[in-house]
Each structure stands twice: as structure tokens, then as C-alpha cells.
Amino acid sequence: MNYTLVYYLTNTVGMIKINNLNFGYSKQKPLFKNMSMQLSNGHIYGLLGKNGAGKSSLLKNLAGLVYAQSGTLEVMGFNPTKRQPALLEQICFIPEEFYLPSVKIDAYVKANAPFYKNFNHGYLFELLKEFDIPANNKLIDMSYGQKKKFIIAFGLATEAKLVIMDEPTNGLDIPSKAQFRKIMASALTDDRCIIISTHQVRDLDNLIDTVIMLDENDVALKASVEEITNKLTFKKVKELDESIIYAEASLSGYNAVMPNYHNEDSKLDMELLFNAILAEKIKFKPLFN
Amino acid sequence: MNNTFNINRFGLLLKRQWLDFGKIYLISLLVVAGVLIGFYSYYIPSIERRTDNFDYDGNLDLRFRYGIFLILGFLFTSTVASGYFSILRQKSRAILELMTPASVTEKLLSGILYTALVSLTGYLIIFYIVDLGFVKYLNSNIDAFRIANPKVPEAQSITYQMFSDKNYREYLEYFFAIPFLITSIFLLGSVYFNKFHYIKTAISVMIFSGIAIYVIYKAGGILTKNMVNISHRSAHNDRDLAFLMILLVTSALTLIFWTIAYIRLKEKEV
């Protein structure tokens, strides 16, 4: 195995290093301006942002599917745009729109699994069982949700160290979403980095440990759930006061976000946080810098 | 790990590509066989028809097969080449292809192998089988044709004719690179254009060929203006040199187009 890769897999360091990344589909409309960030193994990152904020584009940059205009991007010590097999076999990319050929599951596995040295056949069949997908199914005959569950199962069975998922819960029914959360939680290991992009924030409840929020060409927030709940408190209040940074009207009063001056325990309300950051970015900035 | 070329990985890639490419390729070969059988059935000398069965030399008239061989061969190999990387225009398929853990070199070589070697070999085999079948049929009925022309010799398969005829053999090798040139152009077109690859590639070829012919013609005129040919070489030598140039230029162009296809594949974004 490549020495760079061994180093990155055996050390808890920045698995992904993004420095001053400038990217856009046209020079007039940049999507990322001087974006910098580091992501480490052993975490499940939730990538959030409005439509068009660049969630999918950031994931594509990480996978080497698009080229940045300037800046550097390193994934496990590799430049992803070079699309080297040593890196590709360590990336599991589950796109929002995917293609599966018209073959049976075992034919697909037989043709694709050998590319991944660590492919775990036992784990694949465990996952297929968990997702209720018969192993002798023809891929083309399966429903969209079943296909999605299959590519998630296949991707995780590759034992890739970087798992990138773009809207993975789209098309999954309610029980499957719960299965997905359970499987993803168990898939996290110390040497693995999982990045999940979604606009359905409730699907990531209790799953992610770090929130990355994109807005206005940059990272608006990157903080662990622990850090967020240490610094902010999320609660229902009857009346608004000056300490509240952001609030949304609810049936019994307001759902509010405020600084956690008294070290109160509260559960992160991701949807509220998302709206709060978008509405009051300036107020939140000093708290997370 | 060798990130440029690994024979095991290349083998895996060929197997994997066959899953998608193989079905289309085999169906296309069946279509080609059907079209060939149709053309042969229509144009082949007929026992019922007493006239128009013989060429100027008094042989069974099978001259139609040269045109069919060239036209159908061009259409088949160019269509196969044009379809190979066209899957990259679909976002979902492109992601799957580009994320497959194989190098760009291996992905391109797999494309070359399937579009240039496998498609060409498949076509030649199908053509040979169909041609041989009809030749055998004609020869089994040769007595019926000898009623109209008692001296008519048995028909020969196109392959036998090519390789047994000194004139064909002498110049065949100079055109060796042309099928590869055609597939390389259409393979490049399949990775270069996002829509209507075949048409766009064909139009590009026409435009560039037109420009190249015009430039060569004009440059030749300017360079040889007010000059006389004082070469002592024979016309035969000049002709051999021209054929050699055809071989060299077509080979060089093929390599250039494959190289550009490599660069385009490497730069492909989704």
C-alpha cells in the first residue's frame, strides 16, 4: 500500500485538507471563495446548506470529479483530481443520482468488488439482509429506494476510508431511514471519515458528530455537536428576551437559540440551528471563532 | 501500488466494462450480420436470373461486397467507437466510471482495446463467415451458373481473394492504420462532445479534412510554382513513397487522437 496512505490511515490527522479553495462553474459566479477547512478520520460530518450553496459541488471536489480554479485540496495525502487508483479505492462516493447496470447483484459484485482490496463480502450480505434486499435480485428490477440501499451497502462493504454521501436518505422510506442511521452509526471507525450532505436535517439527528454549514461561498459553521451544545442552548420559551439570538414561533411559544451561559444541557435542534445561522450569521461568528 | 498501469487491474476493468459494452457490442454484431445477409441475398448472383450474373472477366459478379465491406465496416466501427465514452455525458454513469479505481491510462486502453481491436476483429469475423457462407452456396450451385457461362470459375471468399492476389497484398499494409484512425477519431468524439457525438464528430472530420486538403493543395501550388520536376525516380517509386506517407500519417494521427482522448478523459468533469 502507498506509504502516504498508510500514514494517513494510521494517524488521526486531517484526512482532508482544503486550503483557499476557489471553485465555480463559471468565473463570474464563484461557488467557493478561499474556502479552507480540515476534516479528520473518526467523525461523521453533516454537510448542510441551502439549495445551490455548493454541498454537492464540495463533495465532487473531494472526490476529484470537478476541478477547482485555485487553491489546494488534499485527500489522504493525494490530489483527488489526479484520480489515482490508490485513492479511488479508498473513497466510497454515493451520489444523489446514481446508475446501476442491468445485471444481477452477484454479477455486479463480482465485476466491481475486486477493485477494492479490502472489500468485505460478508459485511455486504449482512447489510443487504439488514436492508431487506434479496441477494439474487436483478438491479434494474429493484425500486429506487432498494437501489439506493444497495449502493450504500456496496459502498460501505468496500471498507473505503472516506465515505461521501450526497442526499443518501432521498428515496428511502421511514423504516429504511432508521436502518440507514443505525448502519451508518455502526460503520464509523477510527480510521474512517464519513461526510453526509443533506437538506433533510432531521434524517441526521443523533447520527452526525460535526456540523458543516455552507453559505455565501464559504463555510458558515464547522463545529462538533458537543461544541455547539456547549456554546448554545436550544429550548422552548414563552417570551422573547435580549439573550435570544434567534427564535421561531411554535404552538406553545418560541423555539429559541441562545448562548449557553449556565452550561445547560440541551439537545441540538439542527433545523433551528440551520435557520439561525443563515439568518444571524454575524451574531454566531464570535461564538465559534 | 502502481497508479498508472497494473495488468491485474486492467484485466478487472476489461471484465467490468464487458458488463455494459458486451451486450451492446454483441447485439450490434448481430445487426451487422443481419444487414450483411440482407445485402448478400439481394445482390448475389441468382440461379433464376440468367443474365447480369457475371463481371467483365466472366467470373461470378461479387463486386458489390467490396463496397459493403468498406461502408458497413466504417459504420460499425465508428458507431461502436462513438458509443464507448458517450456514457460519460450521463452524470450518474460518469460518476460511476470516473470513480472506478483504475487509472485514466487503463480506462483509455480499455476503450482502445474494445473499440479498435475487439470491434474490428468482430466485424472481420462476421464478414468472413457471412461471405464464406454465400461463396459456399454459390459454389454448390456452380453447375447451374455454368449453363449460361460454361467457363465460370468457382467463387472465392473475399479474404482468400485479398491475400492470394499480389496487387491487393502489395498495398494492403499501407492502409493498415486507417481503421484504427477511424476508431480513434470517433473514440475522441465520444469523450469530447457531450451530445450528438457521432454527428458532431463526422462534421468536425469533414471540416478539418476540407481545411487540410485546401491547405495542402494551396501550399503545394505555392511551393512548386514556376518549378519543373527534375526527379529521376520512377513513377513506381513515387507511388510507393506516397503509400508509405499514407501509412505514417494515418498511424501518427491515430496516436495523436488517442493522446487527445486521454487528455480529455483525464480532464473530464461531472
Image (cartoon, grey):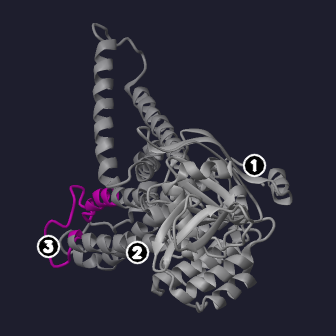
Q: What element carries label 3?
A: loop
- Give the residue type at disc 1: Gly
Give the spatial CA distance, label 2 vs label 3: 37 Å
Q: Is residue B108 above or below residue B38?
A: above
The answer to which image quadrant residue B206 occupies is top left
Q: Which residue is drawn at 27% across and 63% down?
A: B62
Tell me the mark number nearer the camera, choosing from 2 and 1: 1
> What is the crowding at mark 3: few (fewer than 14 residues within 10 Å), some, or many (at least 20)?
some
Give the spatial CA distance, label 1 vs label 3: 78 Å
Q: Name the residue under label 1.
A: A77
Tell me the mark number nearer the camera, choosing from 1 and 3: 1
The answer to which image quadrant residue A91 occupies is bottom right
Left or right, B72 with respect to B56, comes to right
Mark nearer the N terminus (2 vs 3): 2
Residue A10 percent location from the top left of the image: 86, 59
- Give the residue type at disc 3: Arg
Magenta stretch: includes residue B44? yes
* Mark number, residue A216: none
- Residue range corresponding to the magenta coloring: B43-72
Give the spatial CA distance, label 2 vs label 1: 44 Å
What is the chain letter for disc 1?
A: A
* Mark number, residue B27: 2
- Give the residue type at disc 2: Ile
Residue B27 percent location from the top left of the image: 40, 75
Q: Considering depth in this image, is A116 or A179 the residue closer to the camera? A: A179
Q: Is residue A176 above or below residue A246?
A: below
Residue B17 percent location from the top left of the image: 55, 67
Q: Considering depth in this image, is B141 or A30 the residue closer to the camera? A: A30
* Mark number, residue B50: 3
Q: What element carries label 1?
A: loop
> What is the crowding at mark 2: few (fewer than 14 residues within 10 Å), some, or many (at least 20)?
few
The answer to which image quadrant residue A267 occupies is bottom right
